[in-house]
Image: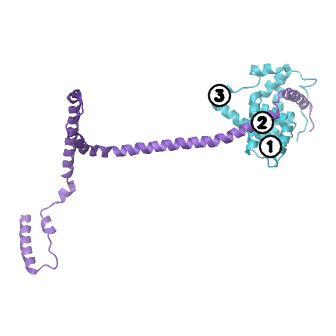
Amino acid sequence: MEISELKAELEKLHPASFGWALSCCASNHSDAEEVLQMVYVKILQGKAVFRGESKLQTWLFAVIRKTAITEQRKQLLRSLSSIVTPGSSPSVELEFDRSEMQRRFQEELAKLPARQRETLHLVFYQDLSLSEAAEVMNVSVGSARRHYERGKKRLREALDREGVDYGVGWRRKENSGVVL
Amino acid sequence: MELGGDEKRIQALFSELSFADQSRVPQFGHLWTRAQVSKESRGIGRPVAVLVSLLVTAAACSFAVWTWYRSAETPNILVQLPPAIEATYTPTPVKVEPARIDTRHPKHIARRRQVDRSIATEAALLSSWESPTQRFMASPTDLALGSLPALNQSAKDLESFLSKNSEIMKESNR
């Protein structure tokens, strides 16, 4: 794929990429921006090459995830105390005028294990199938499904505990949907 | 993908989150340009870093070699020093101030002479040195063994040699 063609595709995916980068960087805006820029640098340098073996989106998301993990490791080495968690940072809270419900949802989402959070984000936020999410996360479909189910269950339980009413029958309804 | 009740609600929350995130997405063009600039600067930075590291390594190596060479050279300088001192210090110091002659110069010469003497004694000891093994191996029969006749020597010479040799052997046996 030519670089101009790739650039056009990347531009289309840019908002979704940024959303995914935010999720990978614990909702830290500047970190997400930095990661996304690094991904573009990798693409320009030819370190990350799209070979057409999968969808461009899943390939790009996998690169973003890998870059974010590498950056987090670097940050951890620099300073163990500098990791920013969503909800704990007052700047994040002040920056965006979010509803109480949304804030609690994000807090509970941040408490989930990384794999579960990532699966939920890819399925619900990015509207990917479980097999695509598995590809992005470099895990098997079965594993991705397990993360999805457990994540969903834990999120529901946590939100119930918080006493947040999200609508009629939130607590009573059981999941019966098939995602794949 | 068919979603259940819980999933629809989670989807709604994620949609809200997505909507909030959309407002703070940085411009693609801005990030892309920065990435291009970063790529170029990194492209230049790497060869420069390699060059600098090479230069530093070369400097360190040359310094190490120079230090080693200097340390290896030092003993020669010490050994060769006495003749040079003889040559330079034998004539009386003419252009030195009187104050200096009284204080520094005699001390200097005395020190040099001391060095001379020590070197001379060391050299004498070295020249007369004999290995202990060589000393233990020495015996009175060395002369007899060392003076064997050649094969083409005349019979008379051989006789005289044998008689002389037998005497020496008797002496050594005693």
**Quarter of the C terminus of chain B within the rendering:** bottom left
Which residue is the site of mark 2?
Answer: B33
Residue A80: mark: 3
Indicate whether B16 appears above or below B86: above
Question: Which corner quadrant of the image does residue A124 belong to?
Answer: top right
Which residue is the site of mark 1?
Answer: A59
In the rendered structure, which amino acid carries the disc numbered 1? Trp
- Label 2 is found on which chain of the structure? B
Look at the numbered disc 3 and give the secondary structure of its residue.
helix
In the rendered structure, which amino acid carries the disc numbered 2? Thr
Query: For the view shown, which residue lies furthest in the front direction?
Result: B95
Residue at point 6% right, 74% down? B163
Can you give x and y, in whole percent of width and height, for residue B52 in the image?
57, 41
Q: Which chain is cyan?
A: A
Can you give x and y, in whole percent of width and height, for residue B159 in the image?
7, 77
Q: Which chain is purple?
A: B
Mark 1, Cα crowd under 10 Å, few <14 / some 14-19 / many 20+, is: many
Q: Earlier in the sequence, mark 1 or mark 3?
A: 1
Question: Which corner quadrant of the image does residue B97 belong to?
Answer: top left
Question: Which corner quadrant of the image does residue B31 belong to?
Answer: top right
Indicate whether B20 appears above or below A44: above
Residue at point 19% right, 42% down? B117
Q: Are marks 1 and 3 on the same chain?
A: yes
- Label 3 is found on which chain of the structure? A
In the rendered structure, the answer to whether residue B58 lies left or right of residue A37 reads: left
In the rendered structure, the answer to whether residue B45 lies left or right of residue B53 reads: right
